[in-house]
Amino acid sequence: MNPVITANEVELEFDDDRTARDETRVRSVRSRVRTRKRNHRWSLRSRALFAALVASLMLTVFISLVLSLRMLSLSEENDELRHQNELRDAELTQVRPELERLRADVTELIAKRLPGLRQLVLDQVVPIDDYYLRNVMFTLVKRGKRAGYEYHLTLSNDTLQMVLPRVNIYLFDRHGVHIGSARIGGTGEHVEEVPDLGPGETVTKVGLVTIGEGEEEPVFFRVRVAEPYTAEERESPNPQR
């Protein structure tokens, strides 16, 4: 016998199909909603990244512009300084001969006023050959704020008698003003001792001439060498020299 399908069963089967279609539609809608939300989130993130990229590019362009303007300004300042240096060099070139002439005139006048004056050049041996003094050399020595000038004297006795050297050193500034001195040998206060020179003996005497604080640096020097003073004359109760 064929089963008999009632109207209620048909209606129940129809309802089941409609419920299944509804559930499928709901799942589809939910899937589309989730997809839209995900796409929306990616869209917001993309916009934020794009905005950050644009801001970074604008900042880079601004910094590049500022640096370019600064470099242009520095280049103009450098050109101006170079131009001023060129003008100054040109002026110095024009006045240098006159300055040299004036310096020579001053040196000549000072030399006439102070016979025996010599130009002081550091670390240069200056021949003297006066009695027992063969040469002298000066070296700059710093002691705190004060400057000293170390002298190196070469003394040689070419006689057959023992002698006692006596040398006076005077330093002068560029105006010919006496600013320092040293006494080597002889008697008295502030005298640098020096040994007697035997026949054929050569020694080097080193000492210091101190320049007062605030004084100009020495430009000239003068050396005065006393006539040889023998040991017999030194021991004499009434030395002639």
Image: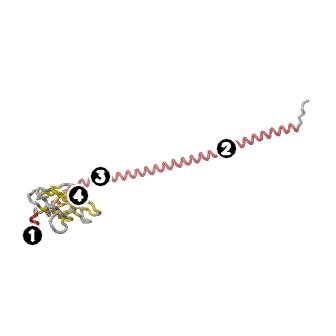
Under mark 3, the amino acid is Glu
Look at discs 2 and 3 and give the one toward the viewer: 2
Task: Locate residue 218, reporting x and y percent.
Answer: 22, 61
Residue to which mark 2 is pinned: 36
Look at discs 2 and 4 and give the one toward the viewer: 4
Q: Residue at x 21, y 64 (%)?
A: 180
Look at discs 1 and 2 and give the one toward the viewer: 1
List the single residue furthest toward the right: 1
Closer to the N terminus: mark 3 or mark 4? Answer: 3
Task: Locate residue 134, reporting x and y percent.
Answer: 14, 56
| Residues marked 1 and 2 touching at CB (< 8 Å) | no
Q: Is residue 42 above or below residue 164?
A: above
The label number, if any, that marks residue 139 in the structure image: 4
Under mark 4, the amino acid is Thr
Residue to which mark 3 is pinned: 86
Q: Inspect this view and state whether residue 94 appears.
A: yes
Closer to the N terminus: mark 2 or mark 4? Answer: 2
Closer to the N terminus: mark 1 or mark 3? Answer: 3
**Alpha-carbon neighbours of circle 3 within 10 Å: few (<14), some, or many (≥20)?**
few
